[in-house]
């Protein structure tokens, strides 16, 4: 917490802040990022995990946003294999409207044109049922298939931060901004507090970037900010064997016609998403309500009736808050625009809104505002490859190539070190996931883990993928990770108790007695 001088101080350790840090550092700025909780703690570990071009935005006439999203999706597929992967989507057509079908197919033709690809989208009922064999067959006329992409959102943030560090940037989690500092009407830095020790320190910066997303209006000392409408998106996680899918299945909810999806992700099946006003405040961790839970279960039962899915089939839930700009028009949550907004004042640039997919474009737009405040900094802000090329690590004889490619995508230049750190049997995959034990060891050793929740909810996703937050595996996780973390027995046991209480309150199945309406 000693006093240091920087060109750029970035506040917020989600994907937007990480992107700004990377793009600034690779262009020569001395940059520091601070995050008051853990990296990706907020929206960026609780998204729908989709890297998508925004087909819905195309239908709404938002061509610029769609074109930008498609371009960024293609860049991530090219630059981050093993971390960002293609995902086919299947949309069942029950013959309700040929006009809607034609419109959908026309939109997909434009979507393909933007991406520079061509695909066959329409399938007859028999072929479509082969893609999604468990869907409702009664009245099925056929279906539409298209391709987007998916990722592990928290690992994407960590990979971007690692790339930024390789260019000389620094990033600190559990460091909060107490207040912005000013001199002569200009923001000149910030007073920081170490959330673990309570120590205070000052940082001077030529420009401060507020990249805190849904929390963008909560920093003391900044000027006027736009009005935000925090929206909550909630999800269910089911075992892959209970809801087996090769393609993502998109459907219209039987109650209100809103789109709901289910797709294979990290060894489980992910179901989402709701889109509701988040009225619980931003200081507390978001969680699904009973109304949202029942809403998503109703969609699954309607689309996959023969599977007879029950509440007990759900492994975990999670909810995140999206930073959406409030139009002030009183429209439904799903109708609000998803574009980002950058605004500034002397010494301060703030950014909020936008999508996971477009983080690079958002970062470059933000740096354009920074450049106007740094007269001596003349940088080329044209897009560069998201990540530098990294070799596939070498593993022991018999190590699956797919695992090594996955480690390269998730860990970049550290992938070989992850493999080399693995002890006997630690390149084996933890059942029910795609995660080898070696990733736990590496995270505990080298990835700024300060809480057990950091390890199980963000460095790995075991707390979402395994029943009861992976509680059955905690003895072995302890054996692997406690020595690496340097925690004594009392510390581990306190962290374990805190983690399990957090999981039960925010990642488990909500109490049936708390039956709030979903307002989707």
Image (cartoon, rainbow, N blue to C red):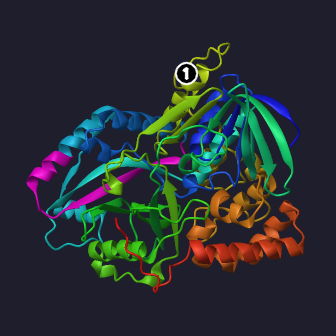
Residue 150 is situated, as x and y percent measured from the top left of the image, at: 46, 51
Q: Left or right? Give the position of 79 relative to 393.
A: left
Q: Is residue 313 visible?
A: yes
| Residue depicted at 52% across the width and 25% down the height | 383
| x and y, in percent, of residue 139 in the image | 13, 70
> Looking at the image, which residue is at 87% across and 65% down?
483
Residue 428: image x %, image y %? 67, 64
Quadrant assignment for the N terminus:
top right
In front here: 82 or 94? 94
Residue name at image x 20 percent, y 48 percent: 104
Q: Residue 243 falls in which quadrant of the image?
A: bottom left
Foreground residue among 144 and 287: 287
Q: Where, quadrant-wise, is the C terminus in this rendering?
A: bottom left
Disc 1: CA contacts within 10 A as few (<14), some (14-19) or many (>=20): some
- Does 236 appear above or below 367? below
Q: Residue furthest bottom?
A: 513
Query: Count of labels shown?
Result: 1
Asked whether 282 or 152 is in front, the reply is 282
Magenta segment includes 303:
no
Specify whether residue 90 is painted magenta.
yes
Of all residues shown, which one is farthest toward the left? 98
Q: Residue at point 79% right, 51% down?
A: 446
Specify start and end residues of the magenta stretch as a single range. Answer: 81-104
Give the residue number, with chain letter if any, for mark 1.
381
**In the image, residue 214 lies at what x, y percent?**
53, 50
Quick one: SS at disc 1?
A: loop
Whether residue 179 is situated above or below residue 461 in the rendered picture: above
Q: Is residue 414 visible?
A: no
Q: Is residue 345 left or right of residue 249?
A: right
């Amino acid at each position: 917490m000693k006093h240091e001088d920087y060109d750029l101080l970035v506040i917020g350790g989600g994907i937007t802040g990480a992107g700004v840090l990377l793009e600034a550092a690779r262009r020569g700025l001395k940059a520091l990022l601070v995050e008051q909780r853990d990296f990706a703690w907020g929206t960026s570990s609780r998204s729908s995990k989709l890297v998508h071009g925004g087909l819905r935005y195309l239908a709404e006439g938002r061509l610029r946003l769609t074109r930008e999203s498609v371009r960024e999706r293609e860049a991530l597929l090219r630059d981050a294999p093993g971390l960002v992967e293609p995902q086919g989507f299947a949309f069942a057509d029950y013959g309700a409207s040929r006009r809607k079908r034609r419109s959908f197919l026309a939109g997909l033709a434009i979507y393909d044109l933007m991406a520079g690809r061509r695909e066959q989208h329409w399938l007859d009922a028999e072929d479509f049922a082969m893609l999604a064999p468990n869907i409702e067959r009664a009245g099925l006329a056929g279906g539409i298939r298209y391709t987007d992409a998916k990722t592990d959102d928290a690992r994407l943030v960590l990979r971007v931060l690692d790339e930024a560090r390789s260019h000389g940037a620094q990033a600190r989690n559990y460091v909060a901004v107490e207040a912005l500092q000013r001199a002569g009407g200009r923001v000149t830095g910030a007073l920081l507090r170490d959330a673990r020790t309570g120590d205070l320190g000052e940082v001077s910066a030529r420009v401060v970037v507020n990249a805190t997303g849904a929390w963008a209006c909560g920093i003391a000392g900044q000027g006027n900010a736009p009005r935000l409408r925090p929206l909550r998106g909630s999800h269910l996680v089911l075992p892959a064997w209970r809801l087996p899918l090769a393609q993502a299945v998109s459907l219209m909810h039987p109650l209100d016609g809103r789109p709901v999806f289910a797709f294979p992700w990290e060894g489980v099946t992910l179901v989402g998403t709701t889109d509701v006003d988040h009225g619980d405040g931003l200081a507390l961790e978001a969680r699904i309500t009973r109304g949202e839970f029942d809403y998503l279960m109703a969609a699954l039962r309607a689309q996959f009736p023969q599977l007879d899915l029950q509440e007990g089939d759900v492994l975990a839930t999670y909810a995140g808050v999206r930073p959406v700009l409030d139009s002030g028009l009183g429209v439904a949550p799903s109708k609000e625009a998803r574009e980002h907004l950058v605004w500034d004042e002397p010494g301060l640039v703030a950014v909020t809104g936008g999508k996971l997919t477009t983080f690079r474009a958002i970062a470059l737009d933000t740096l354009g505002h920074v450049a106007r405040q740094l007269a001596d900094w003349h940088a080329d802000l044209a897009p560069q490859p998201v990540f530098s090329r990294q070799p596939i690590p070498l593993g022991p004889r018999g190590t699956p190539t797919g695992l090594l490619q996955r480690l390269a995508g998730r860990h970049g230049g550290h992938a070989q070190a992850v493999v080399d750190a693995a002890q006997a049997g630690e390149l084996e995959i933890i059942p029910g996931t795609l995660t080898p034990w070696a990733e736990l060891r590496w995270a505990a050793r080298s990835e700024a883990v300060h809480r057990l929740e950091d390890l199980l909810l963000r460095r790995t996703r075991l707390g979402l993928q395994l029943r009861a937050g992976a509680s059955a595996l905690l003895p072995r996780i302890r054996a692997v990770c406690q020595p690496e973390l340097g925690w004594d027995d009392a510390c581990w046991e306190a962290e374990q108790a805190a983690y399990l209480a957090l999981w039960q309150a925010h990642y488990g199945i909500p109490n049936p007695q708390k039956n709030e309406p979903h307002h989707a």
